[in-house]
Image (cartoon, rainbow, N blue to C red):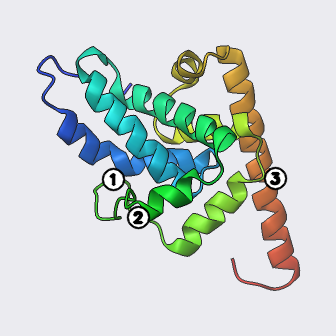
Amino acid sequence: MQHRRGPDGNEFDRFFRSDYRKLIGFLRFIGATKEEAEDSASAAMIYALECWAEITHPFAWVRKAAERHFLRSTARDLDAPKRALKGGWAVGAGLPGHEVPSRADEEAVLALMRNLGYKQRQVIAYTYDGFNPSEIAEITGDLPATVRSNLRSARAKLTSILQESRATADTHGEEE
């Protein structure tokens, strides 16, 4: 697993800078809007800072905390992301992280992800962030076999959608 905490505990700033944008991407994969992802990632990172001395695996810990925050926020108050933006809590795009995809690429990937059920989006997001099925099972509380099954189903569905899309493009003479 990546980003295991060191003994000094003074690495939160480095962790935040290296993982914040990736955490937002993870949340977008599981279905959050950009604003919801930024809100939940910010809340998780603040909580992580408060609990930093007790966290042994921050990479997994913040994902679980951010995911829980997102799910609670969505269920509790659908207006929360808009209020967070108005309140100035949104963070700019200048932080390091994954290479920033074009807006069209980002929208295409998110459109594909919307074809999946929540658990399938969840395992794809964790897998994209470098977790293996056993680690995902530990984080989510699911059985490893369930995680592997959801991952296999998600990959099959995405492959099928992409193949259909290519076949349609080929039939209509469009370039890939």
**What crowding class fits label 1: few (fewer than 14 Cα within 10 Å), some (14-19), or many (20 or more)?**
some
Q: Position of residue 162 (x, y in %)?
A: 75, 60
What residue sits 35% from the left and 47% below the top? 20
Residue 128 visible, this angle: yes
The residue pinned by badge 3 equals: 160
Q: Amino acid at mark 2?
A: Val
The residue pinned by badge 1 equals: 97
Distance in Å between CA atoms under marks 1 and 3: 30 Å
Q: Quadrant of the C terminus?
A: bottom right
Name the secondary structure under disc 2: loop
What residue sits 60% from the left and 50% below the top? 32
In this rendering, is residue 139 above or below 100?
A: above
Left or right of 167, for residue 56: left
Instruction: In the rendered structure, find residue 145 and report the number of the disc placed on it.
Output: none
**What crowding class fits label 2: few (fewer than 14 Cα within 10 Å), some (14-19), or many (20 or more)?**
few
Q: Amino acid at mark 1?
A: Gly
In this orientation, which residue lies closer to the viewer: 53 or 166?
Answer: 53
Task: Nearest to the eye among marks 2 and 3: give it.
Answer: 2
